[in-house]
Amino acid sequence: MSKNIDHLMHEDRRFPPPAAFAECAVARPELFERAAEDRLQFWADQAKSLVSWHTPFTRVLDWSNPPFATWFDDGTLNVAANCLDRHIDAGLGDRVAFYFEGEPGDRRAVTYGQLTDEVKRMANALESLGVTAGDRVAIYLPHIPEAAAAMLACARIGAPHSVVFGGFSAESLRSRIDDAEATIVITADGGNRKGKVLPLKPIVDAALRATDEQPAQSSVKHVVVVQRCGNEIEWMDERDHWWHELRDEAKPDHVALGFAAEHPLFILYTSGTTGKPKGILHTTGGYLTQAAFTHRNVFDLKPESDVYWCTADVGWITGHSYVVYGPLANGATSVMYEGTPDTPHTGRWWEIVERYGVTQLYTAPTAIRTFMKIGRAVPNEFDLSSLRLLGSVGEPINPEAWMWYHEVIGGGRAPIVDTWWQTETGAIMISALPGITTLKPGSAQSPIPGIAIDIVDDNGTPISTYDGGLLTVTQPWPSMLRGIWGDPGRFIETYWQKFGSAYFAGDGARRDSDGDVWLLGRVDDVMNVSGHRLSTAEIESALVSNPMVAEAAVVGAADDVTGQAVVAFVIIKSSHADGGSPADQSAQLRAHVAQQIGAIARPAKVYLVPELPKTRSGKIMRRLLRDVAEGRPIGDTTTLTDPAILSVINAQVH
Ligand code: PRX
C-alpha cells in the first residue's frame, strides 16, 4: 500500500529557488531555526515586529484549558489602526491600498489615506446607528473596496463582522444573521457578475421579511446600502440607510481604541458535516500576527514595489486573510477585481495583470484548470512578465496544472507556493517558502515556521511510513479558531474529541520520502467544489425540503475542472411520480438547491433513482454512490441490504 501511494505520487521534478530570488527573499532560513529553538518566543517576536499594540502583551500562549487557547491575551490592539492609521503615521497615505477594477470596466485607485478616511467615517456612522463593541454586523456585499472598508469599520469599533458571500441565497443569509443575532446588515443595491447586475438588496429584504417559514422578526435593526449598480430597489425609510449618505454626514475623526487581543474580530460561516453551517470565530492579536507573517513571508512581499493580487472574494476566509487583513497590515498595494475571469472576455485576468504590473498572483487550482482548458494562446497575448510569484489555495493542485501555471503564467521563472490552510486555521499553515524551499509540483511541502503538524492513523498514532493518514496540528497556533459561535460543544466534538489536544483538520495527507506533505482531500462529508467548501448534509437537507423528494444522497464526484462536482441521487415520492419528465424534475431540483443555499451549491447532476444503497442499519453508503458517479468499478457491497440496487442505479446513470 505504502509503496503504491509513493509510486502514484512520485514526482521527480524539482525547482530550486533561483539564486537572484533567494538573495533578496523576504523569508530567511533562520526563521526555521528560531522557531525550532523556541516556538513561543518566535511567535512573540512576530507579534511584536508585525503588529502595533496599544498595550504590549506579556503573556504569549495560555493552553491551560485546551482546546480553548489564548494568545497575547494581556495585550490590547486595534486591528483597523494596524491596517490603516499606522501607515498614515508612517507617511504612506498616498500609497495605493487597492487598485479596484469593476467588472464593467470602471476603475479606481483607493489610497491608504482615502481608505482610512472612509473607515473612520463609517466607524462613526455605525456607532451612530447604535453599534457598540461586541455587536455583530452582517456584511453581504460584492467584491468592492467598500467591503474591506465595512470590515475595517467594524474592526475599528470592536464589532465582530460576519461576511456572507454575495452568492448565498436569502435563506442562507437569514440563517447566518439569526445564528449571530446580527443587528445591522451592510449590503449593496447590486453587484456585477457575468455581465449582469446581481441584485443584493432584494435578497436582504427577502431574508429579513417575515414569511410562513420564518415568522419571527429578525434581529436586524438597520440595513446600510452601498450604491454600486443603480438598480431599482425597495426602501424602508426607518430601516434602510445609504452608505454614502452616512459617510458624508459622519464626523471625519475617529479615535481607535485598543481591544483585548482575544476580543472577537469576526465570525465566518463554513460548511461542516451537518446541515447547519458553523460560525468559525477568530479573534484579533494572534490572527493578525499570523495573517501578516504569512502574507509577508509566503508571498515574499516587498510593499514598496509590489502589486499583489489575491483573486478570492472577501466572502471567503482567503479574502479575509489575504485580501484584507494580511495585505493591509503589511501596507501592501493590491488589485481587487469585482467580476468573473471570463467577462467580457477570457483574457480578463491577464489584461489586469498586464495593466497593473501584478507581481504576485494568488488563486485557486480550479481557475488554473479552467484557463488550461481555454489554452495558452489567451494568456500569451498579454505581458505577464511582472509576475514574480504565484500562489495556489483551496484544493490540491495537480502536477499538470502546477506545471502549466509555472510555465504559461509564471514564464518558468516565478516560484509557486501551494498553501494549505482552512477557515478554521485563519492563516496559511503548510506551504513552501519562496527563496528557501525547493519546489515539488503537487505537494504543499512543509509546515511554515512555528507550526507543528503530524499525520496519524485513526487511533492517533503517528504514521511513520509513506501511507496516507489524517492531518493533525499538534500545537496551538496564533490564528487558530477560538470556537464555533454559540456552540462550544460542537467545537470540541468536531476538532478535538478525536485526538485530544491535537487539532483534527478533516483532511487526509501523507508525507513522501523527502518528508514533503501531500494533501489527499477531505476525509469527512465535506466537498470541495472550485475551492469552496460544501456539505453533503446541507445539500441533502435542501433537497428533501422540496415536497417531491422522499430521500436524497449527495456525493462529491471527481471533476477535471472544479476538483469535485456535486452529484445528487434522489428518490421522488410516488405521489409526485407523474410531476414531469425525469429531466424536468431533475432541473427543478437543481434550481431548488440554488435557491435554498446559493448558486455555488447547485448540483452538477441530479439522478432520480428508485432506491439508495443502504446498510442494514440504514446508513447510506455514499462511497458506493461516488464509485457510480465517477464511473469506477463499484467497491464492496456485501454490507448492503440489497446489493442489486447498485446495478439499477448504475444503469440509470451510465
Ligand atoms: O480540504 C482542504 C482544502 O480546503 C479545505 C478548507 O476549505 P476552506 O475552509 O473553505 O478554506 C479554503 C481556503 C484556505 C481544507 O480542509 N484545501 C485548502 N488549501 C488546500 C487544500 N487542499 C489541498 N491543498 C491546499 N493547498
Image (cartoon, grey):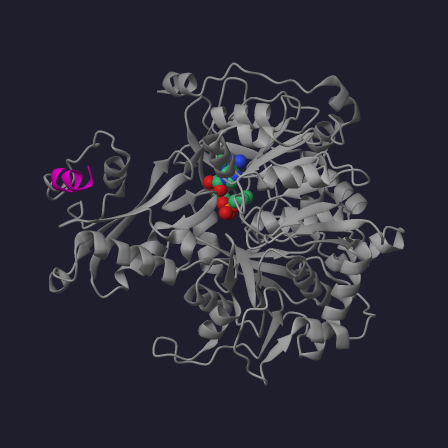
Q: Is residue 364 left or right of residue 652?
A: right
Q: Is residue 324 visible?
A: yes
Question: Is 588 situated left or right of 645 in this image?
Answer: right
Q: Position of residue 457 (x, y in %)?
A: 41, 32
Q: Residue at x 78, y 22 (%)?
A: 23
Q: Quadrant of residue 290?
A: top right
Viewport quadrant of the C terminus: top left
In front of the other: 619 or 112? 112
Hey, which residue is sitting farthest top in the picture? 12
Q: In the figure, is residue 134 to the left or right of 172?
A: right
* Of 104 and 328, the residue lying toward us: 104
* Magenta stretch, main secondary structure class: helix
Q: Is residue 650 magenta?
A: yes
Query: Residue 379 location in percent, x, y?
Result: 58, 31
Residue 454 inside the magenta-drawn segment: no
The part of the image, by quadrant, that contains residue 228 is: bottom right
Range of residues picked out in magenta: 646-654
- Along the line of sight, which residue is nearer the eye, 527 or 467? 527
Is 647 rendered above or below residue 432? Answer: below
| Rendered position, 266 above or below 400 | below
Q: Is any part of residue 53 visible from this angle?
A: no
Left or right, 291 with respect to 85, comes to left
Which quarter of the rendering shows the N terminus? top left
The residue that appears at 52% across and 14% down in the rendered structure is 12
Closer-to-camera residue (266/3): 266
